[in-house]
Image (spheres, rainbow, N blue to C red):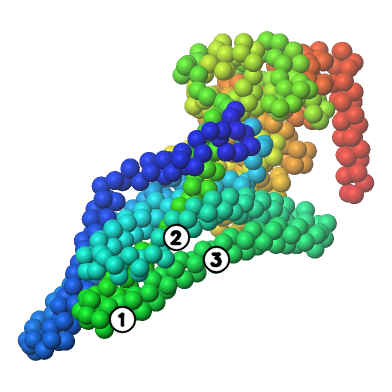
Amino acid sequence: MNNPSGNPPPGGGRFENVRAIAELVWRYKWRFMLGLLFLLVVDGLQLFVPKIIQHEVDALADGSALLATVWRAGLLLLGLQALVSVLRFGWRYYISGTGMKVERDLRAELYRHLQTLSLEYYNHTKVGTVMSYATNDVPAVRMATGMALLGVVDAAFMIVFCTVIMFCINWELACWTLLPVSLLAVLMVVFGRRMHRQFMKVQEQFSKLSDRAQESFSAVRVVKAYGNEAAELAHFDACSRRLARENLRQAKLDALFNPLIAFLTSCSVVILIVAGGRMVVGGGITVGEFVSMSFYLGLLIWPMLAVGWVVNLVQRGTASMERLRAVFATKPGITDGPLAQVADTAVEARGLSFAYPGTEKPVLRGVSFRLRAGGTLGIVGSTGAGKTTLVELMMRLYDPPKGTLFIGGRDVTELKLETIHERIGYVPQESFLFAMSVAENIAFGNASLTADEIEAAAKKAHIHPDILGFRDGYGTRVGERGITLSGGQKQRVAIARALAGNHPLLIFDDCLSAVDTETETSILRELRGEIRGRTAILISHRISTVRDADLILVLEDGRVAEAGTHEELLLNNGYYTKLYRMQKLEGREEGKMVDDRR
């Protein structure tokens, strides 16, 4: 995988970030162009206003003005302002509104891309960082596409035409008046680079704060169980202070940059008043020309201020685009193979060895076995023996070496991901439920399921009576990660989800660890009927779960230490036999305790 840590991709630099933003604008070029057309018409109409005022002021000054012409000029100005208001709605709708569409598309593309990335990426990237891309970086890019484009075009048009008109009125006065604002180019270069670097620091610190908050809230039960609220608050406060410090540095740049622009424009106003006043007194320009020059300078003030605003938006947008480009440059570690069909769901491993990316120690070492289609495989072993890793490779959550793992006689690395996922129903060791209703969780991945089918799956998983006891039955919302349910209830809902899909290959990864022995026996009795005719893989620490399997593997330190049926393994007098005897003794003790209570 490229860039698993999410660092910026090599090469390209700021120009590539700007080009990426330009490509987003180009998708909606006609909408943006229509909005800019409205904007230019508005700006053009505004340029006529000072000329109308100039004409009337000169007419009043020389005594040639008539009341009728003054009324006509006033009505003309009102009409122009009304038209400007209508057209201003147009450019705001098309430019700002289209910017929202760009944000929507970019966020959807980001989410879609994140869905394609393998577990390796998420092993290196925290959830809070991923969330900050969508909540902080995408809006910054949107501002750089819509409002920044507006600011650039508006400022360029008004600066050029106001400057030309001012030179036409009096080139000498225009030169003196516009001299201070010529320093803006130097300010943009100096402050632009600093703003880009500082905004990158702000975004990175925001990601760290999001990481901290997400971890703290996800582990709220552990935090409260240990009474560690004060320590968590201290950690969060430290992250918050660092973010505030970086934001203050950003604010200092803004606070220095924008007033400097305002100061330069104020200098221009002072020069106009002093130099222009002397020219009026000396007869170099008329009073109307002086008034119109002041109006055109006033029209220039917003574009001059907008230059600073645009520089700020563009620097923020390019910094965020740099971070997003790093995400988009990260290639999926798991990609589709060419094959879309398999003959059956037989599973076979041939000398399978595997180490997680970035590590050297193998988790699996030379694992070999063959499970016929419709058969049941049981896997037992101590913690860290590689049981979960083996089934994760079957589902291509990670890719095994080529030629080592097969489903239906086909190398899993040559199969399309959809082909594998359609055939496998998986119940993980840590059952994850979404913050939806119980019914929606059972139907997850199978949206076409009817209420009867959902209920049937719940009955098979022995969770139906519990659901009926909930306040809203199958409509009960389970909270984030299923927090309102017990561990056993979550596991049984997850089992119901797997059974509801009618997958030909079922994988149960120690999914009965949170239920009592009696409930486990009932569920297993139901499961044996459900998995009849399907290929099933049962991972468990309990011998009772796997004892009826056609083949049982005992994994030790990533190797197959023992393999066979329940009866064959008992004859080996190895790890499996010891585990069986220990659990049998524990079962007797548990039964004795129950009898004593009676």
Select label 1 or label 3 by which is in front.
Answer: 1
* Left or right of residue 91, residue 316 in this image: right
Up/down of 91 relative to 109, above or below: below
Q: Position of residue 166 (x, y in %)?
A: 26, 67
| Tag 1 and tag 3, C-beta contact below 8 Å | no
> What residue is pinned by disc 1?
277
Label 3 crowding class (10 Å Cα cut-off): few <14, some 14-19, many 20+?
few
> What residue is pinned by disc 3?
256
Residue at point 50% right, 15% down? 342
Residue at point 49% right, 27% down? 418
Q: Quadrant of residue 530?
A: top right
Q: Secondary structure at mark 1?
A: helix
Q: Secondary structure at mark 2?
A: helix
* Left or right of residue 184, residue 85 in this image: left
Q: Secondary structure at mark 3?
A: helix
Residue at point 42% right, 72% down? 267
Select label 2 or label 1 by which is in front.
Answer: 1
Up/down of 284 relative to 457, above or below: below
